[in-house]
Amino acid sequence: MNSNDHKASSVNLTMFAGTWNHLFGPGRFETQCRIVIDVNTHTLVAAQALSGMNWVSLSVAEKEDLSESLFEGNDVSSAPADFDLEHIENLPDWAVPAVGKTAARVAKAFCEGLGSLLTADEIDLACEQNRSAQESGVCHTHDFCDANAVMVSAFVTCGLVDRGQDVVADNLQPIWNTAWRLAANAGFHADAIQYADSGRKEGGGPVTLTNVRKSVVQFTVMHFGDTNLSSLSLAQLVRECDVGECLSGTFGVVSSELLTRDQVDAESRKLGSEGAFFLDEDDAENI
């Protein structure tokens, strides 16, 4: 994002939010997630998964997996409404911890920078013009100074961009957009910057900020002929052994969670195998 060619917005036109069902790993049921995406940068801004009655944050690996499904597997950025995602101007309360605290610091620094360049009358006029032309999405602080350069300087002040640079990386755009919105909503007065408490609840239970969920189910192969494969996961087995031979043979598989026969057979189909997976006798009796 270059301060010389990017016209920043006072109203966010690129963020969408909604729910998304995702399969995080073999042997799992689909998990309901709530998401915020930026369709301009193809970025998953924030995401949480429903675990019991609580919404919990995703691990880094889970966010990467979900992002791949959203933007590469389904190309949601091209038509978010087709996936029941709704345009939002502001981050929902639950998503604020992912972006809001950093954005608030940037917004304060941005307002302080504007205050050193513009008179009080110019700031008031920019706010008035923003209100009267809100649909355009253009912030009228640009009429009085190089506001993008001021925003980049705010990123430098907050330690997000190296001093001397005039570019903010695309992966920081959610912070850029949120900071601009916070500043505009505060009338570009630093002492008026506010953001939601990260502990607020939103239907379904408290927000948990610790990564407590496993992203995949591990399978352990107990034996294959004379070879001891007890330390290998299913993924390692596929890499280490001849897939066709292994999957057509008879070997035991133990899961870290109880699976139905349909789930086990589904994993076989994913790997292109016509053979069945075999549970150990104790697990088989419970299905």
Image (cartoon, rainbow, N blue to C red):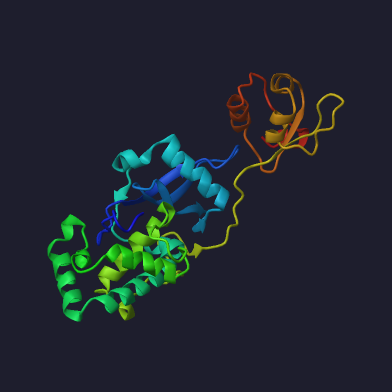
Q: Is residue 40 visible?
A: yes
| Relative vertical location of residue 51 with respect to residue 68 in this rendering, above or below | below
**Relative horizontal placement of residue 119, taking residue 190 as reference (left or right):** left
- For the residue pair 92 and 181, the one nearer the viewer reads as 181
Specify the quadrant of the image occupied by residue 12: bottom left
Specify the quadrant of the image occupied by residue 156: bottom left
Name the spot of residue 102 as percent of width and height, x first.
44, 67
**Relative horizontal placement of residue 273, taking residue 54 as reference (left or right):** right
- For the residue pair 205 and 127, the one nearer the viewer reads as 127
Name the spot of residue 1 as percent of width and height, x first.
36, 54
Name the spot of residue 230 as percent of width and height, x first.
80, 36
Which quarter of the rendered picture does the C terminus lie within? top right
Q: Which residue is depicted at the point 63% across and 18% down?
A: 274
Name the spot of residue 99 as percent of width and height, x first.
43, 62
Q: Which residue is depicted at the point 60% across and 57% down?
A: 212
Q: Which residue is depicted at the point 61% across and 30% down?
A: 267
